[in-house]
Image (cartoon, coloured by chain):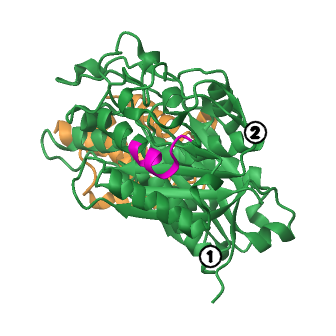
């Protein structure tokens, strides 16, 4: 059986810089930070990290009420990003065989706010009668995926990849395989996440969040930096349109890049700690699948959450495979760690950098940490022809994910 | 509680929870056909009315007979008077 080729033909993003890929890129290009001090978070006893990168929600009423009622915050982001991605791809669903179009949308927490509200209503007296019908739909793990599918009225495969910070890359890998195998022709793939103090708390409790920059929020997070002190959560959604190459060519679609490799491995060691060896294996295997040697990668968009341990392990892994030969950057300094959405929001930015031939610097990387040296950090804008991108993603559970895409 | 208060509070639920324009909220309006509520919405309507009026209505048999806004106003009025008595 011949596997089909898969290309990326559309991008849609909702990020702390606003709705749309253009807004994201403006913020990245201008070196801005979407991180803010979060009012009211200090009511959570013991929460040390009080900063985050929120989205200012807009245009949600454009989604008809009966489609919107089952959507928590992140599902609205995902629906809006999906709309943009389809428009960008030039795909009008009314003219399509919808049984051949599906979506894979992942998330770490699903609708954290709705889950919290549901329990706040129910728990004091274990009273179920005050819960409305749609809260359950907000709280289901696959809420973002089913909401995108019912909003767009898709009839194809709907899947939800729950892999924390690797959810969006897993979504891409799953969609890639669905098209390669000929099960679907177009897949909307990505992730979504929403902010909530309890989500930050899950990292805070592990001492993994940034706590030293509450008075100076825009100085965090600091990927690979000597003064990094942990994760700053962000929110939003990134959706990419993956499409069968032949179909894309037939309809003269704009093609950002071809997906030529995807790999996911696990460290099998620890639920929270990163592990260089399994990261290296993941990266080597994805390069093998793409048929590329390390010197053929033009740009690495790193995961780099700004934790002490994670950045060090990732830098070591990159150093072992690539040395200092490939420029590495990350946009978490601009928009925080968007968790389940990170893989696709960040790959979207990387694809735009590929389009423009510019790699934007890692914000807040001012002094490279000694344990992150030996790789080519981008600290000023670099003009470079980018024909191939490696996108990394690492998650709780020891999960590693990597994707390679190339200009064709 | 007066009849008008019941009407006003009920209508407020329709405006806020279901984003229905006030001019459509006439007593003869059929909740399903004219106002476009479906089965999920009815669950939410019950919860919202319970919260607004401080009464339990979920398990009332007569709730199934309600078709129009007028039916709904009368239903609530009846429940409120039973509660008073």
* Residue A102 spot, x, y in % from top left: 59, 68
Q: Which residue is painted at 19% across and 40% down in the image?
A: B83
Q: Is residue A127 above or below residue A288?
A: above
Give A64 or A312, whichever is nearer the viewer.
A312
How many C-alpha atoms fall within 10 Å of the one at disc 1: few (<14), some, or many (≥20)?
some
What is chain B's hue in the picture? orange
Residue placed under numbered mark 1 in the picture: A180
Q: Which residue is painted at 22% across and 31% down in the image?
A: A207
The circle on residue A357 is 2
How many C-alpha atoms fall within 10 Å of the one at disc 2: few (<14), some, or many (≥20)?
some
Chain for disc number 1: A
Q: CA distance from mark 2 to mark 1?
A: 29 Å
Q: Is residue A95 left or right of residue A380?
A: right
Q: Is residue A243 visible?
A: yes
Q: Which of marks 1 and 2 precedes in the sequence?
A: 1
Q: Is residue A357 magenta?
A: no
Q: Which residue is painted at 63% across and 90% down in the image?
A: A1
Classified by dominant secondary structure, the portion drawn in magenta counts as helix
Chain for disc number 2: A
Q: Which chain is green?
A: A
- The boundaries of the magenta stretch are A316-324
Tag 2 near tag 1, CB within 8 Å: no
């Amino acid at each position: 059986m011949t596997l089909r080729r898969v290309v990326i033909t559309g991008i849609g993003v909702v990020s702390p810089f606003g709705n749309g890929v253009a807004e994201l890129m403006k913020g990245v290009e201008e070196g801005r930070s979407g991180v803010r001090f979060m009012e009211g978070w200090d009511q959570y006893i013991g929460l040390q990290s009080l900063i985050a990168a929120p989205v200012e929600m807009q245009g949600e009423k454009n989604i008809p009420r009966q489609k919107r009622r089952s959507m928590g915050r992140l599902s609205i982001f995902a629906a809006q990003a999906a709309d943009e991605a389809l428009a960008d791809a030039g795909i009008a669903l009314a003219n399509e065989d919808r049984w051949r179009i599906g979506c894979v949308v992942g998330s770490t927490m699903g609708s954290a706010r709705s889950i919290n509200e549901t329990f706040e209503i129910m728990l004091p007296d274990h009273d179920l009668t005050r819960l409305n019908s749609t809260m359950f739909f907000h709280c289901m793990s696959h809420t973002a995926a089913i909401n995108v599918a019912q909003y767009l009225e898709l009839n194809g495969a709907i899947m939800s990849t729950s892999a924390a910070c690797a959810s969006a890359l897993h979504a891409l890998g799953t969609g890639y395989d669905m098209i390669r195998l000929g099960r679907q022709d177009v897949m909307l793939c990505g992730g979504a996440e929403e902010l909530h103090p309890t989500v930050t708390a899950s990292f805070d409790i592990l001492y993994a969040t940034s706590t030293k920059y509450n008075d100076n929020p825009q100085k965090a997070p600091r990927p690979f930096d000597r003064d990094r002190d942990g994760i700053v959560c962000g929110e939003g959604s990134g959706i990419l349109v993956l499409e069968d190459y032949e179909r894309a060519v037939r309809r003269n679609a704009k093609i950002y890049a071809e997906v030529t490799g995807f790999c996911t491995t696990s460290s099998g060691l620890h639920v929270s700690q990163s592990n260089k060896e399994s990261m290296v294996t993941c990266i080597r295997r994805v390069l093998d699948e793409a048929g590329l040697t390390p010197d053929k990668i033009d740009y690495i968009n790193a995961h780099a959450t700004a934790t002490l341990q994670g950045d060090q392990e990732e830098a070591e892994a990159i150093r072992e495979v690539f040395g200092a030969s490939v420029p590495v950057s990350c946009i978490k300094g601009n928009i925080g760690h968007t968790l389940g959405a990170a893989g696709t929001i960040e790959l979207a930015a990387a694809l735009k950098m590929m389009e423009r031939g510019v790699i934007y610097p890692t914000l807040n990387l001012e002094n490279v940490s000694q344990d992150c040296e030996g790789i080519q950090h981008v600290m000023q804008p670099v003009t470079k022809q980018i024909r191939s991108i490696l996108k990394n993603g690492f998650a709780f559970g020891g999960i590693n994910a990597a994707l390679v895409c190339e200009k064709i | 509680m007066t009849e008008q208060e019941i009407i006003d509070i009920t209508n407020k639920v329709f405006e806020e929870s279901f984003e229905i324009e006030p001019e459509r909220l006439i007593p003869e309006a059929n909740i399903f056909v004219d106002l476009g509520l479906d089965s999920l919405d009815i669950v939410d309507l019950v919860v919202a009315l319970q919260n607004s009026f401080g009464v339990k209505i979920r398990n009332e048999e007569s709730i199934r007979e309600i078709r129009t806004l007028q039916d709904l106003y009368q239903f609530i009025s009846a429940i409120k008077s039973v509660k008073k008595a």
